[in-house]
């Protein structure tokens, strides 16, 4: 969101150690969006109390109790994301558009059901196992422009007060190695660069992120007199995330610097991990036409392995001699855990027999309860940084409500679906929330069904390529739209 782009300014003060984690990174694991079954997607993921859909069961496991026949289904889709990025404070702000459209397996599910209406008050029990995609990290953006200040200002700030052997090997240490910063002749712990204060610099950056968060879920639900449905689920999320940043500064456009020619700073980040959470839920059906229910999901504990490398290529001309140096960081490895907040989901539905339904859900999440936990370390800097991250989360994050509304209209074996929703900001009511609009259709005949669903949303956020303690921070505005398209094929086994 535009007014929280510098939430993690505490990183500006880090001088001797390089960290990849930001407080806001934990939202990659705390904010989820089921883009699994096409039916649920088309209705805005508002079907948590309706049942007979495995994504609904992922939201409220009690809805698995509505199954009267075993079922197998799978779904595929694509997630086109378009971004427009503009570098601010250039005097001639130009936006640049980037697009990605990855194809993915969104879900695969199997439900085994035993239903006997007259033998017991407990009329049915259903067991389900499935795979859901719950977050998509595939995106990229690019910006280009000329603004005052240089990334070497950051590296000089980081290095100030340190001897050269104390510089870290990921940022200021590389800058010293290639000659982008150098000690003052008067004080070897004060560092200079090749730019005068506030010099306009031509810069661009390409940022690519790839990966997803998926979950393996095991569900069990029971049906009591077709009135009360109770269920539980064990979920095992997995994370696969990669990020590549290529940042460039050049004097070719402005041609005002007699020494500096060009620099390219590359960052490579890979994160993988797995975790666990549990969920329980209930649904009460006082009559055929009305259903009401809720579920609670425990915090998700995820253990992550992170690797991080940087490369700096720096060119300059001194005494009419062109110089070019390249430095490579060591490969940094880090193991840590994150804990996402409790989640509570409430839902209701009105059903009109042979015509369709209207459904709604409300989900409450308190992002202030997210936590980092650095493991296998006795390093005091690590311990202090963990505390700083968690203090930032507790102070600057907030609770949020997510609302979804949808419906289905049936014409014989053909269904039209619609939906909409709003995802609350994790930074409070005064920040921009994300709205989405949904739709789709489906067909069912002879125990076989085919559904197609889509969701469209827009987003707006801020980005800074680097943080610097000075008068020339860099700001990039990013706007874009996100389209999710899913197709589900399934068969009921009577």
Image (cartoon, helix red, strand yellow):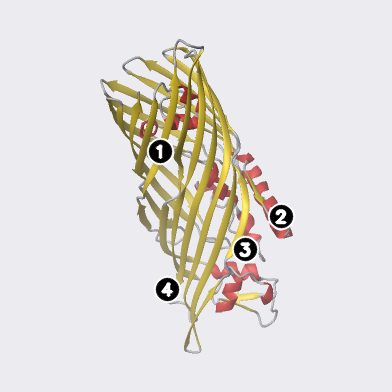
Who comes first in sequence, dot 2 or dot 4? 4
Q: Give the x, y percent position of residue 233.
A: 54, 32
Q: Secondary structure at mark 2?
A: helix
Residue tagged 3: 18
Residue 198 visible: no
In-front residue for pair 320/216: 216
Quarter location, residue 29: top right
Q: Nearer the viewer, mark 4 or mark 1?
A: 1
Q: Disc 4 marks which residue?
A: 254
Q: Position of residue 33 (x, y in %)?
A: 46, 39
Regarding mark 3 in the picture, which secondary structure is present there?
A: loop
Between 258 and 318, the one lying in front of the other is 318
**Label 1 CA crowd tier, 10 Å (few <14, some 14–19, many 20+):** many
Name above or below for residue 139 compared with residue 490.
Answer: below
Measured in 3D between alpha carbons, the distance from the residue under mark 1 to the one under mark 3, in whole angstroms, is: 40 Å
- Mark pair 4, 1: CA separation: 55 Å
Figure quadrant of the C terminus:
top left
């Amino acid at each position: 969101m535009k007014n929280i782009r510098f939430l993690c300014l505490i990183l500006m003060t880090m001088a001797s150690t390089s960290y990849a984690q930001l407080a806001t990174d934990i939202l990659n694991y705390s904010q989820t969006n089921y883009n699994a079954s096409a039916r649920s997607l088309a209705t805005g993921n508002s079907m948590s109390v309706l049942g007979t859909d495995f994504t609904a069961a992922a939201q409220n496991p009690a809805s698995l109790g509505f199954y009267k026949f075993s079922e197998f289904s799978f779904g595929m889709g694509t997630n086109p994301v378009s971004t427009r990025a503009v570098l601010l404070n250039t005097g001639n702000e130009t936006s640049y558009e980037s697009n990605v459209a990855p194809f993915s397996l969104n879900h695969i599910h199997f439900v085994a059901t035993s239903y006997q209406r007259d033998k017991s008050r407990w009329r049915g029990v259903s067991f389900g196992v499935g795979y859901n995609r719950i977050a998509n990290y595939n995106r990229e953006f690019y910006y280009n422009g000329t603004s005052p200040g240089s990334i070497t200002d950051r590296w000089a700030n980081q290095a100030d007060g340190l001897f050269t052997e104390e510089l870290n090997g990921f940022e200021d240490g590389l800058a010293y190695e290639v000659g982008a910063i150098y000690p003052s002749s008067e004080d070897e712990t004060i560092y200079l660069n090749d730019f005068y204060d506030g010099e306009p610099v031509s810069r661009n950056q390409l940022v690519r992120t790839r990966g997803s968060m998926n979950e393996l879920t095991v569900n069990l639900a029971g049906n009591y007199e077709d009135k009360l449905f109770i269920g539980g689920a064990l979920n095992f999320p997995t994370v696969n995330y990669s990020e590549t940043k290529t940042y460039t500064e050049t004097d070719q456009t402005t041609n005002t610097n007699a020494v500096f020619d060009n620099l390219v700073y590359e960052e490579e980040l890979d994160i993988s991990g797995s975790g666990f959470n549990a969920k329980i839920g209930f649904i009460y059906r006082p009559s055929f036409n009305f259903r009401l229910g809720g579920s609670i999901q425990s915090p998700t504990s995820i253990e992550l392995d992170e690797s991080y490398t940087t490369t700096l290529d720096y060119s300059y001309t001194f005494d009419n001699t062109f110089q070019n140096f390249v430095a490579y960081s060591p490969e940094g490895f880090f193991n840590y855990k994150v804990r996402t907040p409790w989640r509570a989901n409430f839902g209701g539905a009105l059903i009109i027999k042979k015509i369709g339904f209207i459904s709604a859900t409300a989900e409450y999440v308190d992002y202030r309860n997210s936590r980092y936990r650095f493991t296998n370390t006795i390093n005091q800097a690590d311990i202090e940084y963990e505390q700083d991250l968690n203090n930032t989360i507790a102070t600057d994050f907030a609770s949020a409500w997510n609302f979804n509304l949808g419906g289905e209209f049936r014409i014989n074996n053909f269904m039209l679906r619609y939906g909409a929703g709003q995802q609350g900001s994790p930074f409070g009511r005064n920040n921009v929330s994300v709205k989405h609009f949904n739709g789709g259709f489906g067909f069912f005949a002879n125990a076989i069904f085919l559904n197609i669903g889509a969701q469209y949303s827009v987003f707006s956020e801020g980005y800074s390529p680097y943080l610097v303690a000075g008068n020339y921070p860099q700001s990039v505005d990013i706007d874009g739209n996100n389209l999710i398209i899913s197709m589900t094929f399934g068969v009921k086994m009577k």
